[in-house]
Image (spheres, grey):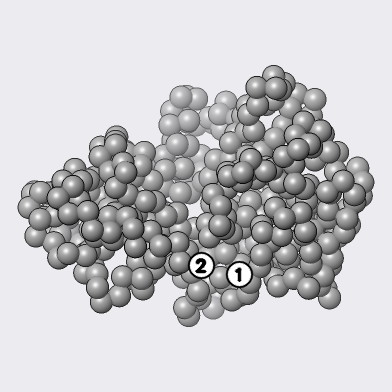
Amino acid sequence: MKYPRYMKAPLEAALADTPVVLIHGPRQSGKSTLAIAVGGEKYSYITFDEDAILAAARNDPKGFIEDLPPYCILDEIQRIPELFTSIKLSVDKDRRPGRFLLTGSANILLLPQLGDSLAGRMEVIRLQPLSQIEIHGSETNYLSLAFDKQPKGSFDHRLRDDLVDRITQGGFPEPLQRSTQKRQRAWYRNYIATTVEREISEISNIRYGADIPILLEKIANNTACLVNFSKLSQGLLIDQKTTKHYVDLMSQVFLINTLRPWHSNRNSRLVKTPKLHVTDTGLLSNILRMNKQQLANEREILGQFLETFIYNELLRLSGWYEQELQFFHYRDNDQFEVDIIILNEEGQILGVEVKLAASVSEKDFKGLKHFKKQYPERFVGGHIFYDGERVLSFGEGMYAVPIQCLWASTN
């Protein structure tokens, strides 16, 4: 089954004016499929998953690049960072837009070999797993309505069990097409093992034992929580410094996303600890070996899963939004907190809270109202996502918003 990818338009725009474009994101999220679909017959396809091609490129990077056709897709570029300097030299001689379309399953911008070699010559497109609107072929303009201070949505039913189904299925294309939960789990087991054993080992040049899988499970148990390296390192044969290094590596191969804390010079009481979110809730469910029945019965864990699910959906929607958005969380020493803060290019701020319930009360807006007082001119709205049927106004720009507004057409 083919899914629409709404990152196609931003990718095409980048190729029209930039010599090198990189699509990076988790393994098996559809990067190669998207690159080939956009490149069409114009682009030659070369993958460094083929050992002979990889060996040839490593042996003579300069000659390899010089012998390429005019327009090329270079797949899994993180396997051979030696090529970056040769790509730079080639681009400096011929700056036609769209010459190189790269894909990578690791954040190569963090690789020390890359440095600034492609600065000013490359645009980066982050491809996430499928969003709900891509899975179901629907449309939403939630972010536009939210920043325009006009959230709306009315539905004839709550999500109920369908919400847990959506959380546990996640957004990776291949397991979505497998007919049984057993076959889906087999795919995820292989995915986790391959990412740890191959991707992490390749970018760090070190082979790991059992520590990273155990650490990944600990992070999954604490998804949507403030990161605590002391707690994460307990029971492992590694110290906090090594734990932090391993977390950075997992972030680099897109197993987890780091949500930065909100920072401000006007508030010295801010908690400056980031949150960690597993990059996909289907992956999250399988790391913890939880099926939808188990998850539905664990309300506290389900609440964490839901916060990660909504954060991931917002991150995916932001990929093709007309402005670049930044994401943060807010917490201070007085215990006021907001799950997600979204900042647009104009400095406008949207606050988002997540609630696993079918109703919302005035007291649920406590953290959002506290945050609004600090930025009254920039704050465009405070939204609490809930499993309800319609957008409800609580005054002062505060709204209860059905979770369905993230993917369903609004009425």
The residue singled out by tag 2 in the image is: 6
For label 1, the SS is helix
Specify whether residue 234 is in view: no
Q: Quadrant of residue 144?
A: bottom right
Decide which of 303, 403 is in the foreground and name it.
Answer: 403
Residue 86, placed above or below residue 295: above
Q: Residue at x 39, y 65 (%)?
A: 12
In the rendered structure, find residue 284 and report the number of the disc placed on it. Answer: none
Q: Position of residue 329 (x, y in %)?
A: 66, 38
Task: Verify CB contact (< 8 Å) between mark 1 and mark 2.
Answer: yes
Percent position of residue 34, x then y: 39, 68
Residue 130 against residue 378 in the figure, above or below: below
Residue 358 visible: yes
Distance from the alpha carbon under mark 1 to that under mark 2: 9 Å
In this image, 47 relative to 29: left or right?
left
Quarter holding the C terminus is bottom right
Residue at (81, 33) in percent of width and height: 373
Q: Residue at x 25, y 40 (%)?
A: 117
Mark 2 lies on a secondary structure that is loop
The kind of residue tagged 1 is Ile
Residue nearest the viewer, comparing 89 with 165: 89
